[in-house]
């Protein structure tokens, strides 16, 4: 993997996700089910 080069590290803005966003994505990934039937993938949300 390549290196990232930054001119001034003090100008970097740290990106932070809200707790609600993280919880939503984790809960969605827990409820997502993918079934493969005859080579075809079917996605379903178990909520």
Image: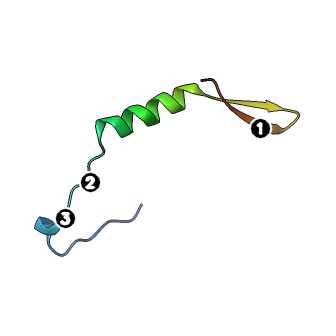
Circle 3 residue: 12
- Residue at (85% x, 38% y) in the render: 39
> Is 42 or 7 nearer to us in this picture?
42
- Residue at (42% x, 60% y) in the render: 1
Q: Is residue 11 above or below residue 45?
A: below
Position of 34 compared to 22: left or right? right
> Is 11 or 21 nearer to us in this picture?
21
Q: Secondary structure at mark 3?
A: loop
Instruction: Compute the Cα span from label 3 to label 1.
Output: 41 Å
Mark closer to the chain start, 3 or 1: 3
| Dot label at residue 15 | 2
- Indicate the colouring scheme: rainbow
Residue farthest along the left direction in this orientation:
10
Q: Are marks 1 and 2 in contact (CB under 8 Å)?
A: no
x%, y% of residue 15?
A: 26, 54
- Residue at (43% x, 34% y) in the render: 24
Q: Is residue 32 above or below residue 7?
A: above
Position of 9 compared to 20: left or right? left
Q: Secondary structure at mark 2?
A: loop
Instruction: Compute the Cα span from label 2 to label 3.
Output: 9 Å
Q: Mark 3 Cα within 10 Å, few/some/many (few <14, many 20+)?
A: few
Res 47 → quadrant: top right
Circle 1 residue: 41
How many numbered discs?
3
Residue farthest along the right direction in this orientation:
38
x%, y% of residue 25?
A: 45, 36
Instruction: Compute the Cα span from label 1 to label 2.
Output: 34 Å
Position of 21 compared to 12: left or right? right
């Amino acid at each position: 993997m390549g290196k990232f080069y930054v001119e001034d590290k003090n100008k970097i803005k740290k990106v932070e996700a809200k707790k609600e966003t993280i919880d939503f994505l984790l809960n969605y990934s827990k409820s997502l089910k993918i079934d493969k039937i005859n080579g075809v993938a079917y996605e379903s949300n178990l909520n």
